[in-house]
Amino acid sequence: SRLTTLGGATSPFVLATRASNASRRSELRLASSHRRVSCVYDACASVFASARATWPRFDPHWHLGHRRRGWQGLVRVQTRRDEAVRWQPRCRTMGMEAERGGTSASATHAPWMEGDEDEEEDEVPAEEARIELEAYERKYADDRTWERVDVAVREHVLEEQRRRRQSRRAPEGIRRGLIRHLVLVVDCSDASLQGDVCFRPTRLSVLVASAEQYVREFFELNPLSSMAVVCMRDGVAEAATEMTSSPETHLEALRAAAKRNGGGASVQNALLVAQRALAGAPPYAKREAVLLLAAITSSDPGDIKATVERVKQERIACSVVGAAAEVYLFKLLAKDTGGTYYVAKDETHFQQLVMAHATPPPSAPDEVACLVRMAFPRRNASDSLGLFGRDATQRRTGLKKGGYTCPQCKARVKELPAKCSVCEMTLISAPDLARSYHHLFPVPTFEEIDEPMDERCFGCTKEFCAEENGGLVLLCGGCKNSFCFECDVQIHESMFVCPGCEQGD
């Protein structure tokens, strides 16, 4: 109620009442303001706490996941005046709806997410979400390049496997020279001491390692053959070993040759030494020379073309594997003598080119088949002493135990296969002769199939769908069993017999 004044003046009671009411109103306004500030502070504290808990940098899949869903922050959405304000992820579909007059979305953005994503994502129509996902796939295809890399690597592995099978493919029933006399020439000149990115640490180390591997594989595939090692250094060629069938003798000579190097390379001197080493080879044996070269020059004392012509007349096939650039002289040597010439790209390629000469080459059409006399000696007792022919007189080793006795002249040899130093009879064992048999009748090449007939490989019993066993699936035409690529390599390069066909027989 309105108060009246007495005598035109305000009474002390009225003044006191007005002051009390004013102070009460100010206190109410201050309390209300304090409550609003407190509410705003509490809301900001909760929002920042939620943002800190769900900040994108702590989630390694945040960028890919939210970019894929078209997430662009949080927007404030209020469809009706009486509806509470809510926050949900902003996406391109919501922007389009806002432009069409649908859901009104403000431009407020926040780098965090609040609430349950699954419930909020369901509000976006499925068709528009699919369109947005396809648009992202086209725009951000480079963000998932690892998928294309995986496909490319898988295709590269399959192509390498097919190329290896194609290089191993050979016509069946072809005549081959099973008795080979080969001279291995290794370049130990100054050029072999150089190293580059493809041949580490030096070319000489790669040459010697490849030569050691080749010696083991050569006698594994050619048990009836013989080999000699020649080293080039200081402009000359030295015979490191004589023509023998002992792989250990050649391996020791190669290890010693790696420590003695220097000077220039002389291909002419190497051909002359190889010619003298192959002079005693029988007419039915294949005469070959494999040169592992790191030099691109040759310091020759005479006309090398005349030497190449004499090598050609003696039917010595010379093959060259180079670790440097191509040289016309080496190419001419291989072409005129019926050999091959390749230049390796790197260490792995060099080993592959060298190992390609381990398989017996096909015989020439004009070669005449000969009947070869061979003997199967008996092994002596371990405590039996005796002289081992020419080896005992040259090295003066005296009496030794063991060995084999020639059935014709009763002379002793240290190991098999070998040639008797007295009667020159070829001495072999039955297993060596059986190991040479598979070159004449190899295992047929397996057929590549898309879908395996069995769930597991017949050889290693691994599942074809397993990740570690991914690759080609091959089918044997005889037993109709499926094999993986690793088992195919083992069968055609080591076992030389199909286990499924043997089990069926």
Image (cartoon, rainbow, N blue to C red):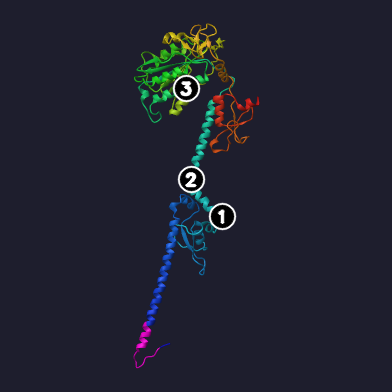
Mark before the other along the chain sequence, 2 or 1: 1
Give the mark toward the camera: 3 or 1: 3
Can residue 251 be seen here? The reply is yes
- Amino acid on which the number 2 mark rests in the picture: Arg
190 up-or-down from 135: above or below: above
Q: Secondary structure at mark 2?
A: helix
Q: Name the foreground residue: 82 vs 142.
A: 82
Q: Quadrant of the N terminus?
A: bottom left
- Amino acid on which the number 1 mark rests in the picture: Glu
Is 473 displayed left or right of 227 in the figure?
Answer: right
Q: Residue 262, how many percent across, how many down?
A: 34, 20
Crowding at label 1, few (<14), some or many (≥20) Cα neighbours within 10 Å?
few
Residue in the picture at 42% in, 21% down:
292
CA–CA distance in space, label 2 to label 1: 24 Å
CA–CA distance in space, label 3 to label 2: 44 Å
Residue in the picture at 56% in, 30% down:
487
Give the mark toward the camera: 3 or 2: 3
**Residue 83 within the segment the image draws in magenta:** no
Q: Name the foreground residue: 125 vs 483.
A: 483
Residue position for label 3: 214
| Number of marks drawn | 3
Q: Point out the stretch of residues depicted in magenta.
A: 3-19
CA–CA distance in space, label 3 to label 1: 65 Å
251 up-or-down from 457: above or below: above
Is 435 displayed left or right of 268 in the figure?
Answer: right
Q: Secondary structure at mark 1?
A: helix
Residue position for label 2: 144
For the residues bearing labels 3 and 2, Cβ distance under 8 angstroms? no
Furthest-front residue in view? 383
Residue position for label 1: 127
